[in-house]
Image (cartoon, rainbow, N blue to C red):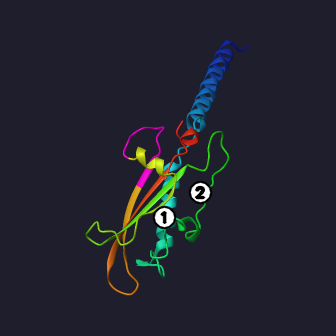
Amino acid sequence: MKNKRGDKVISIYWFVILLLVAGAMVYMVSVVYGGPYDVRKIEASLLTDKIADCMASGGRFVSAMPGKLNSDNLLQECHINFNNEEYSVWNNDQFYVEINVYFFGTKNPKIPTIKAGNFQLKDFCGQEGKTLSLCLDRSFYVLENQGNQAYEVNIISIVRKTEKNAV
């Protein structure tokens, strides 16, 4: 006859190991999926890219851009919609865009500043904090269609959405 005490001891260790592995898996899943994703930086980057593509193609202004763009028709001309999904206390004031076009090498504007969205969000740019709006400031250079005059286009994109993304 065999001694069966050794089998019982091994089964207890297997049970403990299974519990440890299961506990570790539950912990890892809760750490990864436990909080919301902060996608504001991606949203601001996409908004900036959309405006840049609307204004310039191949390093040159698109047709009569930026002459036909202004603060009133920016969203319509670039096919941008600032409406967002319904979420608790949000209104449609979660975005802001500001576009400046300067002559190359100077800060002399070619056209007046183009603004759209909630202008109050700009007050929080440059400040650090998880519950503040995310500001993205990007610049690129572009040539005029008819000549070789170069311009610097500066786009500031701001996304708020702090209640949902930055908890």
Label 1 neighbourhood size at 10 Å, few (<14), some (14-19), many (20+)? some
Q: Is residue 132 magenta?
A: yes
Q: Which residues are magenta?
A: 126-136
**Mark 2 to mark 1 CA distance (whole Å):** 15 Å
Circle 2: element type: loop
The answer to whether residue 20 is seen in the rendering is yes
- Main SS, magenta region, reads loop
Q: Compared with residue 151, is residue 91 higher up or lower down, i.e. above or below?
A: above
Q: Compared with residue 151, is residue 35 higher up or lower down, i.e. above or below?
A: above
| Residue 88 screen position, x and y as percent | 66, 39
| Residue 121 screen position, x and y as percent | 47, 47
Q: Residue at x 63, y 39 (%)?
A: 89
Q: Quadrant of the C terminus?
A: top right
| Residue 12 screen position, x and y as percent | 65, 17
The disc at residue 89 is: none
Q: Left or right: where does residue 144 sit relative to residue 73?
A: left
User: Which of the two discs, 2 and 1, labels the residue nearer the N terminus?
Assistant: 1
Residue tagged by mark 2?
82
Q: Residue at x 55, y 45 (%)?
A: 161
The disc at residue 49 is: 1
Q: Compared with residue 1, is residue 93 higher up or lower down, i.e. above or below?
A: below
